[in-house]
Amino acid sequence: MRTQHRYMKRLIPVGKKIIDSIYFHKDYTDSMGDYITKATFDMVSGIVKIQDCSYEIVKWSKKANTVSFISSPDFDSVNEPAVQSAVIVNLTKSTVVFRKYDPLKGPIYHHKWLMVGDDYKGFDVSEAKERSRFIVEKMAENPSIEKCKIGFKKYWDEVAIPLISICRE
């Protein structure tokens, strides 16, 4: 019997949980209420609005006590969207950090369907789930793919995708 990979099921109703962080699409920030108060979220999102920064993803990190507003403009249009920039608000230190990423080498998101609800209209959620299932299975068949590197566009495009494609045949 095949066990279901942790990325193939929701651990929480909406949001992608990785270690101590949860990633939400901006349309689902109401789901953050179980993790951060609405007043705190409104305060930090106000900082981002003042800076006139656009974002698609909000990341809450319990351990770092930060809320990050992440720009990923191709979130709806590509399978593994790239992170373009982030505004990171540290709630403990009351600091704001701006980060830019190289679009050809920087971080990308896998399993983006976890960041939205099943009702999301920006992309086909069922299709994204099927892609996740396929990728998880093919990666299991090819242990030479370094899982710690697949979250970066350059490695994903140049190493992982060709190896996954070979497994397809």
Image: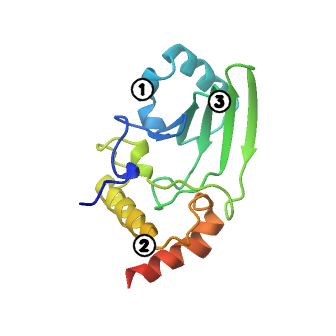
Q: Measuring from the top left, give residue 40's x and y in whole percent.
A: 57, 17
Determine the secondary structure under disc 1. helix
Q: Between disc 3 and disc 2, whose residue precedes? A: 3
As drawn, which residue projects farthest toward the front? 1
Q: Between disc 2 and disc 1, whose residue precedes? A: 1
Q: Quadrant of residue 54?
A: top right
Which color scheme does this rendered protein use? rainbow
As drawn, which residue projects farthest toward the bottom? 169
* Quadrant (top left, top right, bottom left, bottom right) of the N terminus: bottom left
Label 1: few (<14), some (14–19) or many (≥20) C-alpha neighbours in 10 Å: some
Label disc, if present, on residue 141 of the rendered structure? 2
Q: Which residue is identified by label 3? A: 48
Mark 3 in CB contact with mark 2 (< 8 angstroms): no
Q: Quick one: 1 or 60, which is closer to the camera?
A: 1
In the rendered image of this protein, does residue 44 appear above or below residue 144?
A: above
As drawn, which residue projects farthest toward the top? 39
Determine the secondary structure under disc 2. helix
Q: Which amino acid lies under the numbered mark 1 shown in the image of this protein?
A: Asp
Spatial CA span between label 3 and label 1: 17 Å
Residue at 55% x, 71% y: name it.
160
Spatial CA span between label 3 and label 2: 43 Å
On the rendered structure, is 137 left or right of 81?
Answer: left
In the rendered image of this protein, does residue 7 appear above or below residue 142?
A: above
On the rendered structure, is 141 left or right of 65?
Answer: left
Q: Quick one: 65 or 31, which is closer to the camera?
A: 65
Q: Which residue is identified by label 1? A: 30
* Quadrant (top left, top right, bottom left, bottom right) of the C terminus: bottom left
In the rendered image of this protein, does residue 110 appear above or below residue 40?
A: below
Label disc, if present, on residue 108 of the rendered structure? none
